[in-house]
Amino acid sequence: MSCHIILVRHGQSEGNEKRVFCGHLDWDITPLGVKQAERVCEYLKGRKIDAIFSSDLMRAYHTAEPLSRVLHLPITKSKRLRELFAGDWEGKSVSTLLSDFSASFAVWKSNIGLAHPENGESVMEVQTRVYKKLTELAQENEGKTIAVFTHATPIRSFFAFVRGMACEEMKHLPWASNASVSEVVFEDGAFQEISYSTDDFMGELVSYVPKSM
């Protein structure tokens, strides 16, 4: 038996809009993010989805809500699907990160797989956390299709693992766009990629991680 997992990045957040590093700060989606959540719902509502899971942070949970309403499925929250805990970077603007955390933020921008914010999680710790959670969800939902709403670093680091990339190679994998859809299947104890950051359905609403981040 296999499990099909549909991974959705949250819609544009207040942190994305303000160019602020959110991490675990519980900021919501913007009006554009709301429209993106509705658009991804339109894209997915015809699929046979058996369960919906989400990071417990508002920006992911509120992106999942339109699909939850349309499919009449509850959203199961998990802290283990959260974005990277950014420690001293949380709530800091890009300009502050460039000035006050120049060395560590330079690693984030140039070699993401090696990044580790001061007093926060490393990207590789996020990868391990998310991989273990998605493996558990896949094993608990054999024969089903599930939608998982999460964040940029969890998706990017997880797909780097699925592709067999070393941490130093993760920089070659782009960020998933806001409310984009990525898919894997879990079978015989391993994940296989179906697609990464599909966003053509988003049309004029598409938005990306700011290049400054």
Image (cartoon, helix red, strand yellow):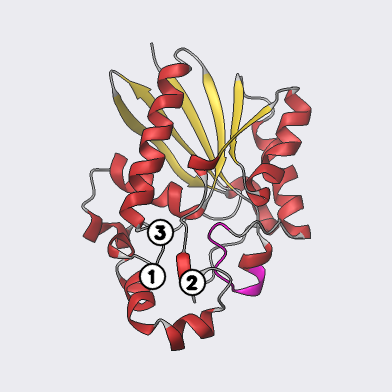
Looking at the image, can residue 190 be seen?
Answer: yes
* In the rendered image, the vertical position of residue 72 relative to residue 95, given as above or below: above
Which of discs 3 and 2 lies nearer the camera? The answer is 2
Q: CA distance from mark 1 to mark 2?
A: 7 Å
Tell me the element at label 3: loop
Residue beneath the point at 44% across and 48% down: 154
Q: For the image shown, how many numbered marks are present on the structure? A: 3
Residue 10, image x and y in percent?
61, 49
What is the quadrant of the N terminus in the image? top left
Q: Is residue 50 found left or right of 174 in the rendered image?
A: right
In magenta segment, residue 161: no
| Residue 89 tag number | 2
Residue highlighted by disc 1: 118
**Do the CB atoms of the residues marked 3 and 2 lie less than 8 Å apart?**
no
Q: Residues within 10 Å of mark 2 (few under 14, many from 20)?
A: many
**Do the CB atoms of the residues marked 1 and 2 lie less than 8 Å apart?**
yes
Q: Is residue 42 found left or right of 207 in the rendered image?
A: right
Residue beneath the point at 39% across and 16% down: 2
Give the mark, 1 or 2, whose residue is nearer the N terminus: 2
Q: Is residue 163 found left or right of 140 in the rendered image?
A: left
**Which residue range is magenta in the image?**
17-24
The amino acid type found where label 2 is placed reads Trp
Q: CA distance from mark 3 to mark 1?
A: 23 Å
Residue highlighted by disc 3: 174
Residue 133, image x and y in percent?
42, 33
